[in-house]
Amino acid sequence: MSSTSNADLSNSPIPELGLTWQSPPAPIAQMLDAAPIPNVAISPNQRWLVEFERPELLPIAELAEPEIGLAGFRLNPRLSCPARMNPYRRLWVRSLEAGAERGEARSISLPDNARINFLHWSPSGDRLAFTLLEATGLALWVLDLPSGRTWQVTEAILNGTYGTPLRWLSDETLLCKVLDSDRGDPPQANLVPVGPIVQENLGKKSPSRTYTNLLQTPHDEDLLDYYITAALEIISLEGDRQRIVPPCRIDEALPSPDCRYILLTTLHRPYSYKLPAGFFPRRFEVIDLTGQSVYTVTEVPLIDNLSTKFDAVRTGRRGISWRSDRGSTLYWIEALDGGEPTQAAEQRDRLLELPAPFTAEPRALWTCEFRFRRICWGKDDLAMVWERWHDTRQIRMWRINPLDPTQTPVLLSDRSYEDNYSDPGLPLMKKGEQGWNVMHLTPDQQSIYFTGRGVSPAGVHPFLDRWNYQTGAVERLWQCQDPYYEWIEELLNDEATEFITQRQAQTEPPNYWRYDWRHGVDRPPQILTQYPDPAPQFAGIQEEIVRYERSDGVQLSAKLYLPAGYDPQRDGNLPMLFWVYPEEFKSAKLAGQVTTPRNRFSRPHYGSILFLLTQGYGVLDNPGLPIIGEGDTEPNDTYVEQLIAGAKAAIDFVVERGIGDRDRIGIGGHSYGAFTTVNLLAHTDLFRLGIARSGAYNRTLTPFGFQGEQRNFWEATQTYIEMSPFAQADQITAPLLLIHGGDDSNPGTYPVQTERLFEALKGLGGTVRYVVLPKEDHGYRSREAVGHVLWEMVNWCDRYL
């Protein structure tokens, strides 16, 4: 427990807010401030391992920088970049070449207090381009990895407000979105309204989910134009600039793999006040390196008529991009069913391609019964495609021959995507001849390397397979073994005898290892990095995957955490927190599969409930709360009943295990987990307290679907009402801590959801505390706010649990 006992708090309220940020008790504060394990990237040429360091938590002063919310996103108007970025601060480079000294990393020299974003490898893999955030915006920099030298290519002229501001054209040139030097000051709002703001809908169905930061006025439209407008320039590493596209509203500019053409996407009016920018009209065209238009791919109107069904798509050409195995061949998808999943159709989607010079008729490569999901290109006569259908949870994997589309596609896998035990994984990718990623093939070109999580009843053990796509034979080349959780990061040769993995265990932090089996598989791997435990105060915590059963026979599981040194025989029952987040399933059998790795190195991050283990609490993390709807039944039609059954099963388990006390169990969650928490408090008296962070509690405020619910409010009125704990607020008697980010931009979880629930509970005489975190979004990112959230949670548990 924390140093303040329950007795001390029984007659003294938790201090009121409005003073200063509070810090959580030791050792939580020290763990929050520890340097995290670096992020790692391996260069496409496999010569370099680059480490990136950034703090997990930002000072709230950075979240308080100026920002504007427009068309569904937030931008920093002063810096011409997305608001609330968490940039990297430092870089190190390690050589992966044979003979290079292991374990040595070179620190890369950068300006003091560097803020690094938008990193991109050069085609050769020996250079890394990135932006540095300066006082006035984004400057272009380059790192040469062999020498370790960095240099500034441009002043702060890049526009990263929307989309990617830089891409390589060659090892010596980059394609950049550049601010217009003549754009002047931002448009000023007319303080005197010139008239009303009018919206109308003349009989057309235009449903939409609940989005935030949308356009609201004509002035907002002008601001959007101003901030996303950029010119397109080719910039050399010496800083020479060639403008090829004058200032316009650029979404993306994607060079073809051979860099002869650019797929240019631009935004156009009319805009919408109800939808984010991703639904706005767009023009897709191919231009050459002089900026001349070569081919118009499509012009997409405002997408305001999609149904809220999960497999609904727009009509026309979509998913437009370049084939990664060809120099300059476009591909795209077209819906054959009008994009409407409720319409009967034998075929739903079609995959087409069009090679340069884009004068021929597009060629169909494949049609599918379900909705197109993804494609992996391999070579001229080989690609892998996936189709999926949400209502049945079915997913199929096919091999197709793009060289001869008349050849019958070969079905390689047909399963429920809820069935993790049968997941064959995905192809490993490598840099192809065109410089883009293609499937990694064996030297004889007859097999593909696959990697996956390896989920099975025995646990989660990632694997590497060799899959002969001609015969269907699968050979397992490698699989991680207990006590490790380890997976393939990179194959270093086509024979799969050299590869890099990331390995961790319950007592070992994640590190990178190199395997070299060229002279036999008995050779032990060599460690490449030696990252220490970022939070040794957490060492000794007990963790395990536990299994138990719901009253209707559904198998459930959870991750059980117990404090270091805890002995149930000696110490008795613990006060416990359940941290929840339910999932929807179409199969009761598949809902019981265990997908959580038991060998993972667990350290708390951000506002994790696991921090409470240091205060003497037990934690049952993500106890199984499957919401199942088999056949034609929708899962949410029995949401409350299944939720209660799952919660009772979890309580019975910890009590029968001898570690939990029915009178000292709390429930908590974030987002949909918060919604679940309040529902359990409203419909049961199983829990002594609740902690609900950034949730939605009144489903009538999300009338066109939420989470896994596709039906709208008028199609499933009773379900929406029964699932809204706001409607049962008078039944909530347990103390409830409500926390919400003041600037939550997540669709559906407006801060008003928590505000209204607090007002209801206060009016009904409930025991409730409402904490608003200024400047915080749906996930909390500042050191001050995260520390305060943990302080609130510890105090609430100490007082009521």
Image (tube, rainbow, N blue to C red):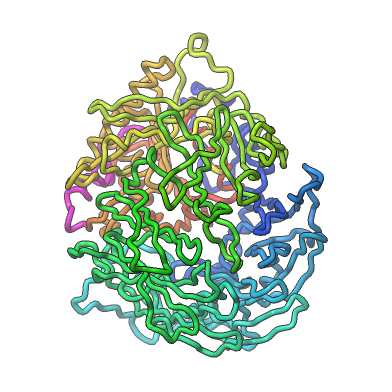
Seen in the picture, residue 538 relative to 342 is either above or below; the reply is above
Looking at the picture, tell me which residue is in the foreground, 304 or 738: 304
Residue 738, visible in the rendered structure: no
The quarter of the picture where the C terminus appears is top left
Q: List x then y, in percent, for residue 743.
A: 48, 58
Residue 32, visible in the rendered structure: yes
Q: List x then y, in percent, for residue 362.
A: 38, 79
The residue positioned 49% from the left and 48% from the top of the image is 450
Residue 585 occupies which quadrant of the picture?
top left
Magenta segment boundaries in residue numbering: 713-735
The quarter of the picture where the N terminus appears is top right
Residue 81 occupies which quadrant of the picture?
bottom right
Q: List x then y, in percent, for residue 492.
A: 65, 50
The residue positioned 38% from the left and 48% from the top of the image is 695
The residue positioned 46% from the left and 20% from the top of the image is 574
Residue 82 occupies which quadrant of the picture?
bottom right
Seen in the picture, residue 540 relative to 711 is either above or below; the reply is above
Magenta stretch holds residue 716? yes
Instruction: Give the left or right position of residue 437, taking residue 319 as reference.
Output: right
Magenta stretch holds residue 565? no
Looking at the picture, tell me which residue is in the foreground, 142 or 439: 439
**How many numbered tags mark residues here?**
0
Q: List x then y, in percent, for residue 384.
A: 42, 58
